[in-house]
Amino acid sequence: MDNNNFQGNIDDTKYESGRKSDNDGYTLIEVLIALAIFSIGILGVADMQILSTQYNALSRVSTEALTVGAEQMEMLMILPYDDAALDPAPASNPHTFTDGTRTVQWNVTDNLENKSINMTVTYPIPIRGVTRSITLSCVKPQDI
């Protein structure tokens, strides 16, 4: 086996018509196009991350408001039937409780055998600059 002849065959495949073949690497344009495509993808991921953070904050604020309302409703349920916080008189309705930036209001309706409590928790959404509300309802039976 002749080494010179074998080496000559390899060199012949690299050069065609005296030019170097295009399989040796990437051109600068190809690298720039790849970087542009990659950058657009990264920007999309960054935008999704920002939206995810905002929606997590919105969920946290909503959950806190619901928890405050549920706690207040539980407090009303353990009160005696004739407590002032459960007074259905129009002068007393709506009853109001403020917890920081959240406002809890409830109306009591007397149905002879029980009292219906309709509660609304209003809370601000700091990210969007709007307020939202959650409504809770409960029936308190008359003590026997």
Image: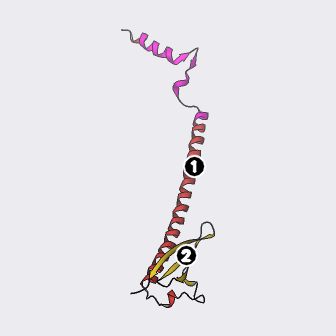
Is 21 inside the magenta-drawn segment?
Answer: yes
Amino acid type of disc 2? Val
Up/down of 23 relative to 139, above or below: above
Q: Is residue 53 above or below residue 73?
A: above
Asked which secondary structure carries label 2, the reply is strand
Q: Residue at x 55, y 48 (%)?
A: 42
Count the numbered circles shown.
Answer: 2
Of pointers 1 and 2, the one earlier in the residue sequence: 1
* Amino acid under disc 1: Gly
Q: Position of residue 88 (x, y in %)?
A: 54, 86
Q: Height in image: 21 above or below 45?
A: above
Which range is magenta?
4-30
- Residue at image mark 2: 121
Whether residue 69 appears in magenta in the rendering, the answer is no
- Quadrant of the rendered image containing residue 90: bottom right
Task: Name the residue rendered at 60%, 66% in the picture.
Answer: 127
Q: Which residue is mark 1?
A: 44
